[in-house]
Structure formats: C-alpha cells, structure tokens
Image: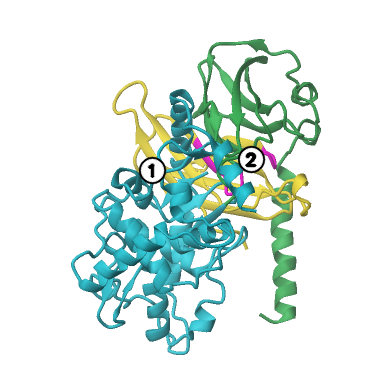
Chain colours: A yellow, B cyan, C green
Amino acid sequence: MAGPMKMRATLAGGNTAAAHTEIRVLMTHPMTTAQSGQPLHFIQNITVKLNGRTVVEAEVSQAVSRNPVFSFRLKGGAKGDKVEVSWLDNKGESSRIEGAVA
Amino acid sequence: MRGFAFLLLLTAGAALGQDAKKEIQKYQQMIAEGSPAELYELEGEALWKKPQGPNSVSLEKCDLGMGPGVLKAAYARLPRYFRDADRVMDLETRLLYCMETLQGRSRKEATQRVFGNDDRASEMEYLSAYIAAQSRGVKMAPGTAHPREKEAFELGQRLFFHRAGPWDFSCASCHGEEGKRIRMQDLPVLYKPEAARPVVATWPAYRVSNSQFKTMQWRLNDCYRQMRMPEPVFASEATNALNMFLTATGKGEPYRGPGTKR
Amino acid sequence: MNRLRRTLLGALAFMLARPFAALAAWNENAFGAKTPQDALKGLGAANPAPSKDIVIDAPQIAENGAVVPIEIVSNIPGTTSLAVVLEKNPFPLAAKFDFKEGALPYVKVNVKMAETSDVRVVASAGGRHYAATREIKVTIGGCGG
C-alpha cells in the first residue's frame, strides 16, 4: 500500500494580476533507479485536477528524487476550490490526495 | 590508523569561501521548503495515538515534561530531569520510558529497531518528527537548574572533549576548532553557543543523502561510529549527557525543525 | 489477512489499476534515451531555440546529488509544457510537465543528479520549442555519515 501523501493548496499573490493558487505536494515513493540494482520502481504519471478538471499532467522518471516533492501553480483560484493530485507508478500502483484551497 | 584519520582532517582544509557558502545556504533553503519531513510527522501522529503493547494503550498520556499528553513546547524543554524515572532524559529516552511503563512493553522489544532504513523509519524516528514539530517556534530551553541536570551537562562536556578509541578522537577533534570542514561541510564548533544554536534548532531531521529521517540518538551513535569507538547504548546516560551538553549550549534558539539536511 | 482474501484483493487492485494504466501515457522513447539529443528528439523538440524567458532557479551547488531542487518558470506566452533534461545523467530526460487551461507554466521539482552537469529546460509553446540551461555543481558532502 502506498505511503502517505501531503498536499497544501493556498492562494498567493494577493488581489493583483499575479494572484494564483500555489500547490505543494509531498509523496512517499522509493523512486528506485536502474543504478541501485533493485527492481525499478518509480512514479511515471502525475495528474493535478482542479474542481474535477485536469490542469497538469506530468510524466516523470526515476531521475526524480526519492519521496518526491512538487510545486505547481494555477491561474487565479478561490478558497474552497477542490484540488486533487494523483500518481501512478511503473508497477501500476497509485495514490491520490484531495484537498481544498485555503 | 591514527595517521590516516589525521590526514583526513588535514585535507579537510580551511573553511569554504563566501560564494560557495551562499550557494549551499540556498540549497539548504530550497530543500527545506516542502520537505518529506512533514510526512514523518503524519506517521508519528498516528503512532502516538496507536494502542500498543501488553497494556494495549497509546502514548497519548505520556508525560514529556509538560504534563501527560502535553506536546506543545515539550521537545524544546528537553533534555530534563524526570522525578518518576529519577534521571535526565532526552526525547527518545523518555519515549522509551513511556513505552515501558504505559504500554507495558519490554525494553528489548521497544529497542529492537530504534534506527530505521530507506523503506521504513523506526517508531522513534516517526514519533520524534511528530513531537518535535509541536515545538516549532519555541525557544530551546532544556533543564538547567536541577543538580542532576547540571551533572548531565558536565558529564556531556567531559565526554565531548574526551579522546579515546583507536584514533584517539573526541567530538572536539572535528567540532572543536574554527575554520574546519570535511569536504563541503563546514564543521560547527559545537561547544560554542553561536554554532550549537542552529544545530539544536534543526534536529531531528530528514537527510536527503540517504532519504531517511534521523534523530539525535542516531546522530550521536553515528558520530561514535565515525570515530571508531564502541557503539553507545541507546538512551544511555552517556548519550543523554552529550545531548544535554549540546542542547544547553544551544539554548535560546527558536526551534525550527524538524529539519532537512543533506 | 488470509491468503484467499489477499489474492482476491490483489486481483481487484490489479483490475482497478489496469484502466488507469491504459489511459496514462509515458514516453518510453524519450525517457529511455541515453543522450540529451536523443531525449529531445524523443520529445519532438530536437533543436530548441535558446530563450531568456525560461527562468531556472536552482542552487549553483547541491550538497547532495540525491536531491537537487529546481524551480522553473516560463515567461514565453502560450507555454504548454516544460521538460527537464539533466545532461550528464545516464537517462537525461527527468520529467515533462504539460499545462492545460488553468495551470501556469511553473514547476518546482527535486531531481537526482549523478554529477555536476548542465540542466536544460525545454519549453514548448505554439508548436515551437525553446530552451535555457543552467549548470549545477554536485558534491558529496560530509564524512559519509
């Protein structure tokens, strides 16, 4: 079973044109590389959804650090917006976290 | 053997140039923003609340010095003397005490796996992350007034400067002189408050070099390993004394851990 | 948990995972490339034009190559994707981010770097590709402890 995830989604940039939603997500995953001699086990896909709609899709490799941390930004945003981040790895394991913009 | 160790220290050379220092500070700052340490805090919270041992109780009534179950600022007040155990205890030592007395667990079982690995941290490591996090922003204030606390400080100080082992090293061999470094790490002179303060304010910590969350008991254990000295017993008087010496030397610093280190 | 239950749960998990697996694309060609040029070719971005509008914020020195933090912003209008290429890594392509309507072309990611090397960020906008480069020095710190 996948380890814990943590996500924080906050509004930033005030009332200016720079207003955006800052999303930071922490994932638990070994992200083992071919070099390690262990079987490859790493996150391949990450999806970020805002209120149910996909806004970011990422393809990542074993070159991403173990227990990866990502930050994304969305245009504008409002308190209570629902953000969901999910990942899928090369073994078909997946995990997901949901939260509201604070 | 002694010659080799000395050579290592010599090649360590003078302190890093200012530019390199600044870039490394930037590195340290960037990895601290959104650190996996937070995930360990989450697991630690779950473990704190989990009933375990023959008594099938959680640690939630454990008294870390501020009263049963009070976590806010508790880490910042350790190590300190505890009357019920009649000894000075750091966080891990006190947790072990609660595991034994509250949960009814044997010392053998509770210390079976005090240091974790890549795949899974130990109970002590998860719990330390969670509890230390509850002291964020609180000034480090270990016990200093009680006679046993003063004793622990003095013992820790003596141990810090005591040379032993096949290399005739003491903690001061690496941490006792200004301007020293090992590869890219400046070595803090830990008996000086200004150097000890940022150190005590950022342990326990997630270490990116091995993707593991590590505590002070581990740090001391590993220093002894590097000095080629016998392994200190977990939660022993010696480790508590050293922890007391270091924390008291760094007192007053607002706690900002759990940290993230290279 | 008894064996039967575990097997059933495993089968269920497999079935649930499968549909997702079928939907998720992963550019094996690009990620399996062993040179930066081949990685770029695999991405369809063989000759990106240099651009000062891709901002890479990263420390010049990484105390440990296991975690190298890189923050990227593209100020090129209409940027729809950002790819991170670590020149000297055994498999240079580290990640590719596609931004849809509502997302800003920004990402912060931690990568593993085998040694000091250039980090190249490729931005795609309006079917064209642009790149910026930054060198990051990698050290192994401390006393191995």
Is B62 on the left-hand or right-hand side of B40? left
- In the rendered image, residue C84, in percent from the top left (x then y), is placed at 64, 28
- Residue B183 to residue C82: above or below: below
Residue drawn at x 52%, y 76% as measured from the top left: B111
SS for callout 1: loop
- In the rendered image, residue B73, in percent from the top left (x then y), is placed at 26, 60
Q: Which residue is mark 2?
A: A64
Q: Earlier in the sequence, mark 2 or mark 1?
A: 2
Q: Are marks 2 and 1 on the same chain?
A: yes
Q: Chain of mark 2?
A: A
Residue drawn at x 62%, y 48% as measured from the top left: B3
Is A78 on the left-hand or right-hand side of A36? left
The local crowd at label 1, few if under 14, some if 14 to 19, many if 20 or more residues have their Cα within 10 Å, is some
- In the rendered image, residue B160, in percent from the top left (x then y), is placed at 40, 58
Residue B148 shows in the view: yes
- Residue C89 to residue B97: above or below: above
| Tags 2 and 1 touching, CB below 8 Å | no
Examine the residues drawn in magenta and state their main secondary structure.
loop
- Residue C24, by quadrant, is top right
Q: Which residues are magenta?
A: A60-71
Q: Which residue is mark 1?
A: A101
- The amino acid at mark 2 is Val
Q: Relative to the observer, which residue lies in front, A85 or B242? A: B242
Residue B131 shows in the view: no
